Amino acid sequence: MNLFLAADRVVVGETTLPLDPPLDAAEFQAEWDLLAAVANPERTVDPAGYQRAVETVDAAWLRSFGRRLFDRVFVGPLADAWHEGSDPLILTVHEPPGDSSDTLRLTDLPWELLHDGTSWAARTRGVVRNAAGAGRLPSAQPGGGRLNILAVLASPLIIERMPDVDGNLVEAEPDDPRQPHVLDIEREADLFRGLHGRPIPADINLRLHVSPEDLDFALGDADVLHFVGHGTVGMLLLESRHGTGRTVDTDWLRERFARRRLQFAVFQSCLTGRRAGVVSGVALTLVEAGVPVVLAMMQSVSVDAARVFFSRLYEELGRGAPVDQAVTGGRRAVADEPAVAPWEWATPVLFACVDALSQAVRWPYDVAAKGAGRAMVITLPGPPIDPLMTRPEHFVGRRRELVKVARGIDPQDGARVTLLHGEGGMGKTAIAFEAAHRWAGWFDQVVYLSARDVVPPPEVATHLAGVSRTELDHRELPGDARAADTPARETRLSEAGEVEFIHALARKIGIQTRGDEAPAQILAATLNVLGDARRRLLVLDNLETLTDSPMLLDLLDHLPRYARCLATSRHGLAVDTHTVEVRGMTPRDALLLIAGYAGEKPVGLTRRRAGELYQKTGGHPMTMRLVVAQVSSSARTWDAALDDLRNARGDVFQYVFARSLQAAGEDGRWLLGLCALFAPFARREVLLAASGWGDARFGATLARLRDLALIELHSGAAFGHIVRQPDQGYTLKPGSGSDLIGLQELARAQAGALLRGAPADDVDACRGRGIEALLPVAEFYNQLQMHQWPAFDADWLNLLAALESLSQRPEAKPLLIARYVSALSQPLRLRYVAGQEKWLQAGLVGARLAGERRLEANVLKAIGDVQNFRDERDAALKSYNEALGLYRQVGDKLGEANVLQAIGDVQNFRKEMDAALKSYNEALGLYRQVGDKLGEANIFLAVGRIALAAGDEQNGIQRLEHATGLFEVIGDQSGSANVRIVLGRYAASKGNYQAAIDYMQPAADFGKRIGHPLGDELQKEIDV
């Protein structure tokens, strides 16, 4: 039904019926105000009015409102005509020309709520707002039946300048209520990521944090635009490079969208469907510019509603449905979603050049019916992010700080070193992580390293003992026992700790260190790698104990042009830095943070309570979090918690933390102390074993600590629970949501204090159980040779601590130390750390004491591997030959083959080719006997390289191709890449550069895909 509506009449076809009295939008002002209030909570200025709206607007109220709208328009015979038909409603609303009034207009009314007494028009037949003949017909269908969907998201951190009361532009404060709400862009983007692989023939190009320039460029060949962000009447809010707000108005939109191939535009942003006065609004501007169909929002739309609506919309389009039918399907899906507010299905508004509805963004039915395509989500390439850099779940605010960080780390014109400086618990690390995630696309590599997590464990414990100003007494809190305001005790790292930090950084950027290099040598190598053309961001966390380290200062002072460092520290650095001070949160952001924590449970938070909490804590994030957790966990009431804050003296954080320790109970304090045994995280299964408790007791205590915000839980695909399968070795079970358990630095300091006060025998027993439970982690990495697995760094320090503990008394648990050394042979070879010779020898002693000759052979081979890596060839051969004899004694043919290959590698390095080939051939025969195709492939790779080096091209290439076939059979992409590198470099040496590129490009692509430094090195070699 095509219906023309004016204030004084309604027209359907040849029938014109007068409206008496004339229709006035003001008739529905009261309903409109309630709906606008409940649908736009972020714009609320009248909390009481908002509460009334929440209590009033329900499904029955909406039905009544929709029926009033219907009865006012469908007068006389029109109601019967409507009930007799089945076509969608094509609604044209006429406004008087030149009307510049800002009062409620007919076009503002929610016609999508029309209810005919039986059903909602928009959810059964559909409602389309006719764009009065504007727009155009689609010029062409997408090639191949696939659409190019451009999904752009923007949410600026801050609008830097706003008009004051006199209309003058002045610097705006982050707390200004006119500042836009910062959307969780990653969460919003999950809507599109969730479409990947669905039966929708489309390429979805996902672009985050877009600027006007980004949008203008990306629109090029898009068939569909989907914008997520902030909008208002006649404007969209995009971002600058550094995250500040940039608005585009109807003139910009009209110019940039004219003469595009765009068929359909979607605006998932507030008020983009509305107009005001002479401003036509975003949706109508695009139709006027030639976009035939536009979907916009009359009110705010929630994340849940958007997810449901657009998933169904794109699925319907993928099945070949016209746009209006797809929108109707989306509305029904939202209406069926119990977690979504009852009015949200009516929020989207469809504007169209009506003749285009049956043609725009419609796939041919035969293509869709054959399942000819599935959605592919395409994102701009970016570097992998360390899984330890977990974005905080409740990150809010810090708008100005983030913008300052962005300007500092900008590779175009930023500073070499940007320092986040502030006291503990202020959220410096959270800001650094948020910035690194948000602007990762500027860089080729993002490197994360925490000084607290790489230095030797004894020094960490000493340092953490000085982080807290006093060790807390959680049992009694008389006034004179509260934390005194005394200076913090700081402990500077030893030179060995500083050297280990630089070595760890070198390993992070792909440098293999032996461990005996002079500090100046490893520093020079690090600066040399950082000086290549790759843009790198170094996120160096917790630098307090390194702030006067000559090596660190030398590194930062000489960072090359393309490198940027984002550091966090409680102290300043004696180099030029772009310093961002991190102080207490602003009142508005603090209230949002408090509400975020409290929102997880109904805790009776009021504005008065939140305001007092902010005042008493000075906006200290960690302290506010602990207080809210005390209340939400039912440990304390709001009145009791606030009374405590009123009476607290000295360091408020220390006082609040002591209350949390009290609430944790005896089990909670003990488990919290055990967390200090593991750094930076404890695996759940390891901590469970260390406690010696049953699952129920452990789970209840862990939940208590989590509810009190005393621990942090981390999970992810890289973590998970390592379990042993019968006859299948170890496997990684998907994460349970709490795979890793960590502590914020201030909490770790107090956990260490708790542990130091416990009986030493009890602590040793727990440590021993934890070490035994950690062994499967070591064997899992050894099984997969996955020391570069993203989660490895989260386990590495704990594994080293286990080795250190066991090596002190190898006779106590000889079998265990031997198994550890055997399992960690590869990472110990490639990640040299001080003390490993002692660990290796302890493992050898343990194997001999246990009488395990096979294990003794494994340890001897591990020792030989380390010696070989350190260029100690004679010592390596001695160790290998001892291992070889033991393997032959116990009849371990696979072990014998592995050590023969290692001997061949040493002989090959020494250019003893006949001896090397003899060792390789012996190993090959053994590998074939035991059916080890990986070993066989590695032998063919080695002998193929020898043949090429000797000028025997035919045999060399034949052996290398055989190695490639074996690697492909077992799915070893690394092995295949290594063969390609050898063949490519050989082709280049012969002047056959195209063949070299054909060989090496897949290897370079693989290296870059897994984040291996060799990927970029190969790419540079190819490009040259």
Image: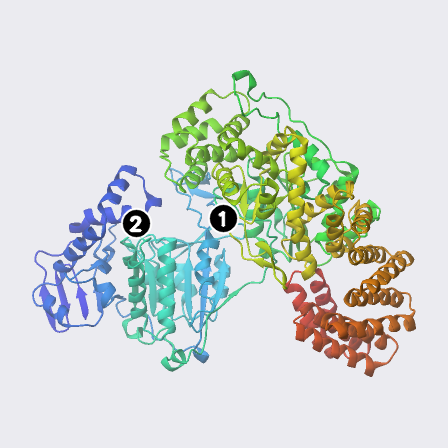
Residue at the spot x=30%, y=52% of the render? 341
For the question of whether residue 250 can be seen, the reply is no
Local SS, label 2: helix
Local SS, label 1: loop
Mark 2 or 1, nearer chain start: 2
Q: Is residue 468 left or right of residue 932?
A: left
Residue at the spot x=78%, y=50% of the render? 850
Q: Give 271 or 538, whichever is nearer the viewer.
A: 538
Q: Residues within 10 Å of mark 2 (few under 14, many from 20)?
A: many
Q: Is residue 654 left or right of residue 339?
A: right
- The circle drawn on residue 39 is 2
Quadrant of the image containing the N terminus = bottom left
Q: Is residue 704 above or below residue 891?
A: above
Q: Is residue 129 above or below residue 628?
A: below
Query: Percent from the top left, x then y, of residue 351?
Result: 30, 65
Q: Give 756 or 276, whichever is nearer the viewer.
A: 756
User: Which amino acid type is marked by label 1?
Assistant: Thr
Q: Is residue 166 above or below residue 999?
A: above
User: Which amino acid type is marked by label 2?
Assistant: Ala
Where on the picture, by quarter, is residue 357? bottom left
Which residue bears the numbered disc 1?
244
Q: Is residue 919 left or right of residue 82?
A: right
Q: Give 40 or 911, whichever is nearer the viewer.
A: 911
